[in-house]
C-alpha cells in the first residue's frame, strides 16, 4: 500500500489491528477502513514506499522526484516478489494514477515523461500487472476529471449498482478508451470529489 511505512506495517501485521493515527493517507478514515479489512482477511501489509531520505534531488514536487519515487517503489516491490513464493498473490494499492502501465506527460512540464509504478514494475519484474484504474473519475478539482462525461452518461446504471461500477478495457463502448493501455479495467463512481 502506497504511503505505508515500515513501523506502521510491522505493528499492524503483528497486532492484526490498525495502529494509532498514521501520516498522510494513513490518517484518512477510508484508508484506515481498507487497512482494517485487509488485516481482517488475514492479509499482511507490505511497505513498498520509497525511503524519502534517499532523495537528494531537492524539490519533491517535481517530475524528477516523481520518476525517482515510482522507480524506487517498483524496485521495492520487485525485491519483495523475488524473495516470495511463486504462487504469492499481491494486491498493490496506490493513488493518483501511480498504477499506470504507460508513460504520461508530467503536469505542467511539457517535455518531461512520467513513468509510473505500473510501467516500472512491469519493466523490472517482467510481470504484467492487472491494473484497475479508479482514479479516472476523481475530481481533484470540482467538476474536472477525465471521465466526467462518462459518469453522467452512465449515472442511472451506476445508481443501480450502488454508485460505483466497472468494466474491462475491451468492454468499454468508447474506442478511445479501448486504445488506452494504461489500465486493464476502469471504475466509475458517482462519489468523486476529493475533500
Image (spheres, helix red, strand yellow):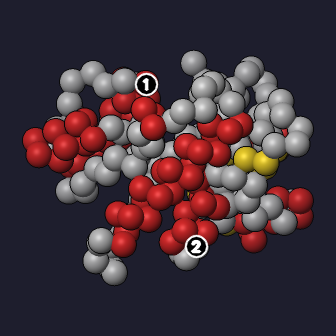
Is 117 situated left or right of 32 in this image?
Answer: right
* Residue 58 in picture, x, y percent from top left: 60, 26
Q: Quadrant of the C terminus?
A: top right
The answer to whether residue 136 is left or right of residue 49 is right
- Choose the circle earlier in sequence order: 2 or 1: 1
Q: How crowded is mark 2: few (under 14 residues within 10 Å), some or many (20 or more)?
A: few
Q: Which residue is drawn at 45% across and 43% down?
A: 50
Q: In this view, does 125 lie above or below 135?
A: below
Q: Which mark is residue 128?
A: 2
Location of residue 95 (image quadrant): top right
Residue at x 34%, y 81% (from the top left corner): 86
Q: How crowded is mark 1: few (under 14 residues within 10 Å), some or many (20 or more)?
A: few
* 3D distance between C-alphas at marks 2 and 1: 29 Å
The residue shown at (48%, 50%) is 73
Residue 113 at x, y = what percent?
79, 48
Name the residue beneath numbered marker 1. Answer: 24
Q: Which residue lies furthest to the bottom in this view?
A: 86
Q: Residue 1 in the image: x percent, y percent?
A: 40, 46
Residue drawn at 42 percent across, 32 percent down: 53
Residue 154's tag is none
Tell me: residue 35, above or below residue 89.
Answer: above
Amino acid at each position: 500500500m502506497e504511503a505505508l511505512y515500515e513501523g506502521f506495517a510491522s505493528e499492524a501485521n503483528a497486532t492484526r489491528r490498525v495502529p494509532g493515527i498514521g501520516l498522510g493517507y494513513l490518517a484518512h478514515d477510508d484508508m484506515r477502513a481498507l487497512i482494517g479489512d485487509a488485516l481482517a482477511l488475514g492479509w499482511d501489509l507490505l511497505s513498498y514506499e520509497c525511503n524519502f531520505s534517499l532523495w537528494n534531488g531537492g524539490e519533491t514536487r517535481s517530475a524528477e522526484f516523481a520518476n525517482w519515487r515510482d522507480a524506487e517503489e517498483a524496485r521495492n516491490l520487485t525485491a519483495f516478489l523475488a524473495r516470495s513464493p511463486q504462487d504469492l498473490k499481491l494486491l498493490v494499492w496506490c493513488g493518483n494514477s501511480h498504477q499506470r502501465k504507460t508513460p504520461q506527460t508530467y503536469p505542467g512540464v511539457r517535455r518531461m515523461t512520467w513513468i509510473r509504478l505500473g510501467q516500472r514494475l512491469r519493466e523490472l519484474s517482467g510481470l504484467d500487472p492487472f491494473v484497475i484504474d479508479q482514479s479516472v473519475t476523481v475530481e481533484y478539482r470540482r467538476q474536472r476529471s477525465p471521465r466526467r462525461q462518462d459518469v453522467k452518461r452512465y449515472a442511472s446504471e451506476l445508481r443501480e449498482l450502488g454508485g460505483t461500477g466497472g468494466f474491462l478495457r475491451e468492454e468499454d463502448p468508447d474506442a478511445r478508451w479501448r486504445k488506452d493501455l494504461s489500465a486493464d479495467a476502469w471504475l466509475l463512481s458517482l462519489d468523486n470529489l476529493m475533500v
